[in-house]
Image: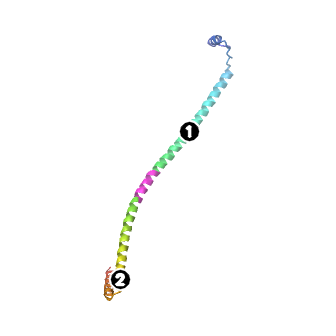
Amino acid sequence: MMNAGLQAKSLKTGVAQPEKTPEKLLAEAERRIKKLESKIADQQATIRDLRAEARDFAALQAKIVDLKEDITELKGEIKEVTRANHEHVARNEALRDENARLRSGAKSPKGLAVTLEVANRKGSDAAAA
């Protein structure tokens, strides 16, 4: 049975509308419900994925902060090691110069006396320490 509004509409268009039975209406409603449930499930999966990405992003940000701190510490250590290296190089150059001076002086008798004097000073410095 068709209602009056539906009948009037179908008379205007000239096409007879099939009557919707309660079974068809129920089937249509169930189809819409399943479609909406599927859409909700997809949205929930998307939300879970986005939350996981947000957690990963936050963890990466924390890691970045830690790495920046480590880099700052390492830069300080590099400066300290470089300074110590420069001091070591300067000390080595001074020792080489001293060694070369002593070797050149050891060839002459006067140089030998200087060499012995330096050796004696070093020995007394070591004993004092």
Instruction: Tell me which corner region of the image, top left, top right, bottom left or bottom right, holds residue 22.
Output: top right
Q: Which residue is mark 1?
A: 46
Q: Residue drawn at (38%, 60%), measured in percent from left and top? A: 76
| Label 2–label 1 contact, CB within 8 A | no
Q: Nearer the viewer, mark 2 or mark 1?
A: 2
Q: Compared to 112, does 81 lie above or below?
A: above
Report the Cα–Cα distance between label 2 and label 1.
Answer: 83 Å
Q: Count the labels in the image.
A: 2
Q: Residue drawn at (66%, 24%), measured in percent from left and top? A: 26
In the image, is residue 95 part of the stretch drawn in magenta?
no
Residue kind at label 2, given as amino acid type: Ser
> On residue 123, which mark appears?
none
Residue kind at label 1, given as amino acid type: Thr
Q: Horizontal and vertical percent for residue 23? A: 68, 22
> 77 or 106, which lies in front?
106
Q: Horizontal and vertical percent for residue 86? A: 37, 68
Q: Horizontal and vertical percent for residue 128? A: 31, 81
Q: Residue drawn at (56%, 36%), measured in percent from left and top? A: 43
Q: Horizontal and vertical percent for residue 78? A: 40, 62
The dominant secondary structure in magenta is helix
- Please state, as top left, top right, bottom left or bottom right, where the C terminus lies in the image: bottom left
Q: Which residue is mark 2?
A: 104
Q: Residue drawn at (55%, 42%), measured in percent from left and top? A: 49
Q: Which residues are magenta?
A: 63-74
> 114 or 23, which lies in front?
114
Q: Compared to 66, does 43 lie above or below?
A: above
- Colour scheme: rainbow
10 lies left or right of 49: right
83 lies left or right of 21: left
